[in-house]
Amino acid sequence: MTYEHLRLEKETPLTERHRRRGMGGAAPADPRAHGAALLRSFEEVRHQVDLQDVGGFDECRLLKIRLRAGETQLPDFAQIPGLEVVSQEEHTIVLAFATEAGLSEVEARLATLAREGAVTRKDLLYVIDGFDHWTPQDRQGAALRELGRPGVEHFVLDVELWPQDQPARREALMASFRDWCDGLGVERVDQIASASLLMVRLRCTNEQADSLLRHRDVRTVDLPPRHGLSLGLVLTDVNQFPAVEEPQGDAPTVAVLDSGLSTGHPLLGGAVGDAQGYVLPHRLPDDGDPWHGTFVGGLALYGDVERCIQDRRFVPELRLVSGRVFNDDGADQTEFVENAVERAVRELNELYGCRVFNLSYGDLNKVYDGRHIRGLGYTLDRLTRELGVLFVVSSGNLQLSALPDDARAQYPEYLFNEGSRLLDPGTALNVITVGGLARHEATREAQRYPGGIEAVPLARSDHPFPLTRRGPSIGGAIKPDLVEHAGNVASMRLPGRFELRGLGVVSLHGGFAGGHAFKEDVGTSFAAPLVANKAARLLRELPDATPNLLRAVIGAHAAWPSASKSLLDPAGKAAGRDKLTQLIGYGQVDDTALLRSLDNAVSLVTEESIAVDQCQFFEIPVPDDLWNGGRRTREVSVALAYTPVVRTTRMDYRMSKLRFTLVAADGLDEVSQAFQRNREVGMPERSSGRWLSGDVRQAGTLQVSRWTFRQRPREQKLFVVVTRQDANWSDVTDLDEPYALCVSIKDRDNADSRLYAQMRAMLQARVQLRARARV
């Protein structure tokens, strides 16, 4: 029997946390000497800025302020009139616009500190280590630094400008930059203008690029996106399968944002709700080069297509819509993919109520460098919160040419190189990012000649996919969130030669009219839609679920595959755990009890909102029978998901910071009083049998852990405590932050378990008790 998931309600106590006090730098040993050194640094930089920077939408200078090591929070430089922080690029690097009056104010304060050893708001000056300017080298993006400029006369560059929160200043900056480009003869191709992301795509010469790298309002200059695909083949006659029927009227919709869709494919049929093109300038139809999009669409619609082939059964439980947002032909796409994605998401959400979007796209020119989330990743984070939609994206792939010649000997260690980090938009915090697992181990040749040794697979089944990319994302957030099957790679006898055939993922062939209905390929692009399929199917059971709840439920049912755990963490040490979270995230989703609860596997779900500096309490309804029957394994999984406001100009990319703590206690009063006495720590989280600690999981907006119990805990009850603490740049702390919580309890070894019925009865009794208390 299966049952709908149970609803969990928070308990009455509500405690406030201490607000953090303003920061202040520790006094240097010699304040006068510190002031004199800062004054010399400031005067030199002021001269360099005047000589080197060009352009600017106003008369301010751009200062680069170096903070002293160990300062982890942004000082309140607004206390100095005329000084405006525009970005914190690293923990110790702050960029600020300064008016002429502001420069004079800073200089006067430094002179006073150097002369007298004391000055008004000296704590602001104590945290400063020195001044610098934003150089052309600082403005070069990672791909431009590594690959250099294209060897042609005119080439395309993506230019990010300093974001402006105020619309009037944003418009003034963009207008000024457009005029500057026109005056220099630089061709403007496309632009993005939002509060935390200003980008312009330009076609320019080397001389014009040199000027761009000196423009005051330019944050970074980089090469435009590129992505790569590989091909394969599966020979299966589509005529073997019954005709595909249209999904039921209430079927949830999954949207695939990709390169197009072959709507006439016989296994798509009536399951396709719509297929539109969103690539400008001509808004190309959704049928230009749809191989990749059809392959991804088949997986999003059916999940495991290979299993469907084996079962000789294709029954769509979802409705599929497609939005063409990029080209798959290697041609120059002049428009920002961010703009095409935003148009597609808004329209498909409005017209068809689409709430789950798959985007299997990775920009090979934006390997994450550990700094800010920008570009498409930021756009997805913003749209998730604004529209209430869920994005499922891929972590990105290494190219075969990037593998070492002796990849078999170096696997999986090469996956931890800096060049193996996530691609944009896989760094986005509010989305589900999916990495890859290997599934098959025998190439086509190995299947034909079992005794041959021409090709040796790099990975075994359920090991990390040999081309997958790793996290973490910003601030150490666990990414990818999840993994799914993405294929495998085999090493040939000749160094640097690899084989893919027979090792990939199977899905629908966009070019079916000229050949076969199925194809094979490898890549995390094909792992992501497997998770999108699960998320959309979950909507049938939880039709009112927000993206937060979808993420929480999916996360609560994820676990590391045992093969990956044995490979990366055979000794159960912290270093192995770090490797697992970087490559596997929270693991692969077990959908046995994902959609509906079972007698011995029960999910409790809730959606709440929490004010700043507060705690909320949830008592887990654990029946006594769970602890009876000796030393068997019981599991309690907890997953928290939320979608905070984000800003690219602060090291604290998230405005709100939520976390959960699982504690064991004899009663609610004991827990609430502990958090009142020590609001920053509360009660120590239960560490016995714990999977991932709070320090490991709390940097992300999806946080998951699991506790294993072999016997009854000494304390009588289990509680989940959710707390909120905001970043120091927050200016909207009066808004409650929505979040979702999923608690999954499994009594795996008890075939006679009545866990669901007992927990439901306990929850019903609580409802009645609360109702009587209100009378």
Image (spheres, helix red, strand yellow):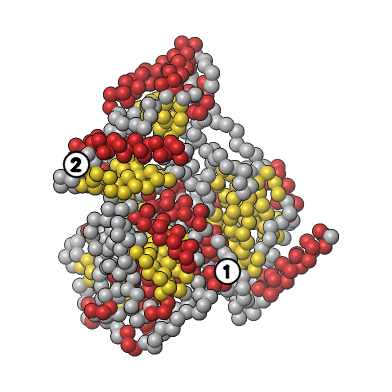
| Left or right side of 773 for 258 | left
- The spot of residue 412 in percent (x, y) is 33, 59
Q: From where the camera sits, is residue 589 visible?
A: no
Q: Quadrant of the N terminus?
A: bottom right
Task: Give how far apart the Cα atoms at labels 1 and 2 are.
Answer: 54 Å
User: Residue at 70% of width from left, 44% of height from top?
Assistant: 676
Q: Give the quadrant of residue 96.
A: top left
Q: Which mark is residue 144?
A: none
User: Residue at 55% of width from left, 46% of height from top?
Assistant: 656
Q: Is residue 200 above or below residue 399?
A: above
Q: Quadrant of the C terminus?
A: bottom right
What secondary structure is found at the residue carrying circle 1?
loop
Kind of residue sitting beneath label 2:
Thr
Q: Which mark is residue 205?
A: 2
Circle 2 crowding by C-alpha within 10 Å: few under 14, some 14–19, many from 20: some
Kind of residue sitting beneath label 1:
Leu
Q: What is the total number of numbered labels drawn onto the structure image?
A: 2
User: Residue at 62% of width from left, 73% of height from top?
Assistant: 4
Q: From where the camera sits, is residue 173 visible?
A: yes
Q: Which residue is mark 1?
A: 542
Q: Nearer the viewer, residue 541 or 336?
A: 336
Q: Nearer the viewer, residue 27 or 425?
A: 425
Q: Are marks 1 and 2 in contact (CB under 8 Å)?
A: no
